[in-house]
DNA sequence: TATGAATGAGCATTCATTCAT
DNA sequence: GATGAATGAATGCTCATTCAT
């Protein structure tokens, strides 16, 4: 994981900075252990996939005992779901922060969205592999989990499109939810290849540009649409 | 499976053309059983996913004994891979046939490709679910399977883009392989939603139009690109 | 199997030499097939042991279909037992014939017995391995089989000792059944080594001499016994 | 198993000698469980043979769960091999201890060896049955196990013969390894009968005397050998 | 809290036996 | 009789989960 791993823990671990180490310590110790388990799970799931990863492997990646995992998570499924929630929450937070900082209109923010999507993947390959590969399976087969955080993620995309449409920048003959889906699918599939092939960061940036260009050009209003 | 199931068997089931039923009969008997098992597996995998499907469930879906499966497939992994090969082969055959029949240029053929992609999904929902959900996992975690048939599929898409580029119809500043991937990703993700939501066929057609329109418009050469 | 294999089939396969091949053919065909299965089983059991040998392996060794085996034997256990019966019967026949031909007293016949025991093992290594390795297991665990043919074999040995005792040549303070057992055990164990090590025939003869000498010298009446 | 079972555990169970029961406790707990499993396996193998014994039967004999067995042994084969190692080690230890205590020459020690051999069998019938019946099969068919502990056992016997030969007490025209084998074979076969027939201890002692006498008299140097 | 030994339900796979041809 | 595809009961082993310490 390395340098960036701490960034990926949504449950802000130590924002208080109290002067006393008495009782908060235990709190932090716990939270830190929970975080270690999630990191271990991420690493393991990225490497071997959810179904091929043993709970004991996660434990050893995390440096805790098998049983400890069950102090923080109900079961293996819950661990997977929690990992999604945690990472997606972090991703969403970051997306929103960075999008807010974008200086420009909807078009620039959509481009920023796409570039950030790829940038996150470069920063944490394990996370990228995990999400690209496990998201579909788990959404469908891990109990009845509805993956609300992923829905939130899509809502951001969807919102951008909506806004562009109401501002008259994007074609309004397209269903914004559909466009969001398609865009996510395109990004996700390309990312899958990038992570599996362990493409170099520079190339990744280039690919992001291309995807961005291809999609955007298809979305902007123009005199003669090819809509048949 | 129903009406269309027969269409999805790549091993052409009736090659005989002889007037006598002498020896082909035995051949067909076992080919048919192999086919039944593949169908059962498809149904079961679509319903519960590869890892949650028991071999005995596949057997009972197929109407054969558990042990029979091992007469036709080495193990559960091999069954999954064989199912991919078989269905992808069939899809590719059909794609090629229908694309050849398209009256028009590259643009029309790309549109036809997209429509056919969705049409196939409507014809066999189980197949659509199976491919959208299991393709990624298995490509990565089922032994070292490299999924050559899927590569063939992508090659068709990739070839269309290439041709469009050399004919000056599509932007040549885009990497055709990347575009192919992105397009597949968009189609696949949208299909995933359609199948999971069990969307009505009419809406599917409409969605295909939109995706087609959105993508195409981004690919054609126009005076002012937004390429940043 | 080779040259000697035919010798080991107790059910005399074709001693008649009739001029007509009409109906005897079927008879002989059957008997011959039964013999082939027994030979295949012997080879397979010698190579991999009863429990590690699949019925289908026996079938393929014998050049028949799996199901054919069940036309001649009730089940796998029965095949094992029949093989014992058949081979032991043959061995016993040969022992009795050769012992009858021995020119000399009990002492010479006991020596001949020991030599023949080893000689048979050299003639058919598979048979030797089969009997040394499988006899104990099967005697104990294959149903309630009491191995009457093996009892017959021991009776010959036992009878020789008895006779020697009543003739005053062998010590009569020893239980003849016990001596028989011990002698068989010694021969059997040494043979086990010989067959596993694939010792050359010449050495085998030498070892037979030694065993014979060692045992005999302990059995004959002498002025000062070490009986404690 | 009963009274004597504890004796048969080679891993010396009480190495502590400390006054405190602090840390050895855990150690002993798992060693004890390993021991219970070996005892259960011995009982089960003696009763039904290796191939007819289910792992779950061993578990229930040992009073542990099926899975527990795999915490201590790699698989069923490993359990068998471990059982051999453990029991043979114990037997060898005891043989060496008792032989060292023998007051007398090689002759007395050989007699002691034979008597101890039988005595051990009476003390633990299951062990006797297990070794007499399973030794051969397993040596040959359980993986590539070479049974080094059994080789050690034979070495003791072999060493006794060697010593007797160099002291001029035993005939030196016999190969000591061959004599060792033959002697073991005789003892083993007689033991097989004794255990299967559940002979009374008194008779066993008598039989040991006879075997001992028969063999010894054949080994000592005498003016007129029958070596032919 | 934390541990990790113990549990036992669960499952892929095998293989002796059957039976339609 | 002969075949060998089909059967399905049987079983070794795994691994998520528990719980005594």
Image (spheres, coloured by chain):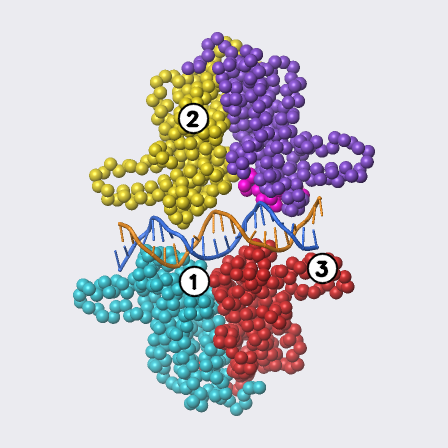
Chain colours: A purple, B yellow, C cyan, D red, E orange, F blue
Q: Secondary structure at mark 1?
A: loop
Looking at the rendered structure, whether the residues under marks 1 and 3 are on a common chain is answered as no
Could you tell me if residue A195 is visible in this image? yes
Q: Secondary structure at mark 3?
A: helix
Residue extending farthest to the right is: A19
> In the image, is B10 to the left or to the right of D144?
left
In the image, D6 versus D95, the foreground residue is D6
Percent position (x, y) of residue C116?
40, 75
Crowding near pointer 3: few (<14 within 10 Å), some, many (20+)?
few
Q: Chain of mark 2?
A: B
Q: Chain of mark 3?
A: D
Q: Quadrant of the C terminus of chain B?
A: top right
Q: Residues within 10 Å of mark 1 (few under 14, many from 20)?
A: many
Q: Residue B96, relative to residue A228: is it above or below?
A: below
Residues at marks 3 and 2, common chain?
no
Residue drawn 44% across the image and 59% down it: C52
Of residues C137 and D61, the one nearer the viewer is D61
Marker disc for residue C50: 1
In whole angstroms, how far apart are the C-alphas of marks 1 and 3?
45 Å
What is the magenta range?
Answer: A49-63
The CA span between labels 3 and 2 is 69 Å
Residue receiving disc 3: D24
Quadrant for residue D35, please give it.
Answer: bottom right
Name the residue nearer the viewer: A93 or B200. B200
From the image, tell me which residue sits under label 2. B200
């Amino acid at each position: 994981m390395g340098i960036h791993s701490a960034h990926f823990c949504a449950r802000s671990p130590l924002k208080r900075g109290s002067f006393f180490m008495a009782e908060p310590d235990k709190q932090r110790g716990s939270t830190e252990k929970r975080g270690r388990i999630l990191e271990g799970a991420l690493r393991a799931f990225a490497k071997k996939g959810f179904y091929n990863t043993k709970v004991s492997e996660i434990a050893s990646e995390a440096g805790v005992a098998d049983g400890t995992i069950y102090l923080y998570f109900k079961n293996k499924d819950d661990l997977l779901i929690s990992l999604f929630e945690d990472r997606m929450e972090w991703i969403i937070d970051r997306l929103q922060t960075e999008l807010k900082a974008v200086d420009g209109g909807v078009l620039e923010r959509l481009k920023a969205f796409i570039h950030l999507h790829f940038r996150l993947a470069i920063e944490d390959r394990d996370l990228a592999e995990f999400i690209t590969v496990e998201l579909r399976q788990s959404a469908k087969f891990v109990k009845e989990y509805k993956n609300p955080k992923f829905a939130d993620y899509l809502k951001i995309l969807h919102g951008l499109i909506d806004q562009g449409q109401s501002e008259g920048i994007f074609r309004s003959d397209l269903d914004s939810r559909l466009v969001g889906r398609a865009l996510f699918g395109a990004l996700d599939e390309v990312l899958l290849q990038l992570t599996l092939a362990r493409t170099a960061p520079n190339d990744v940036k280039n690919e992001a540009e291309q995807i961005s260009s291809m999609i955007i050009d298809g979305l902007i209003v123009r005199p003669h649409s090819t809509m048949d």
